Image: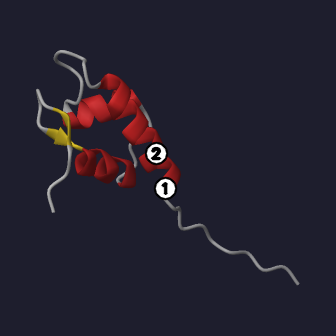
Amino acid sequence: MRGMYICLCNAVTDHDIRRAAADGVRSFAELQARTGCSDCCGCCEAEARATLDKAIEQVTLDLPIFVTA
C-alpha cells in the first residue's frame, strides 16, 4: 500500500512519518533529521507536524505491569 505524499520535495509519505514515530521520533526536528521532511520549501510543515502529532498519540508503549500484594 502506498502512502500519501506529505513532502513532495523529499518524497516523504504519511507512512514514513508514522514509521518514524513508531521508531521513537518525538519532535519535528527529529523527523526532519531522519526523513528530510520540510527541509526544502517548507510548504508541507503544517501537515507533517499534524501527521507526526497524530502518529505519536497512536503509538502504544509496552509498559511493565506491577502487581502489589
Give the numbered dot on residue 54.
2
Give above or below for 3 relative to 32.
Answer: below
Q: Is residue 29 left or right of residue 44?
A: right
Q: Amino acid at mark 1?
A: Gln
Query: Quadrant of the image for the N terminus?
Result: bottom left
Q: If the image is split into quadrants, where does the C terminus sit? A: bottom right
In the image, 17 versus 46, the foreground residue is: 46
Residue 35, x across and y down, in percent: 21, 36
Residue 28: give x, y in percent of width and height: 38, 30
Outermost front residue: 4
> Which disc, if any, is residue 35?
none
Q: Nearer the viewer, residue 63 or 43?
A: 43
Residue sitting at the far top: 41
Q: Which residue is mark 1?
A: 58
For the question of whether residue 30 can be seen, the reply is: no
Taking depth in this image into account, of 29 and 10 the one nearest to the observer is: 10
- Mark 2 and mark 1: span between their CA atoms? 6 Å
Q: Which residue is the extreme one toward the right?
A: 69
Amino acid at the residue labelled 2? Lys
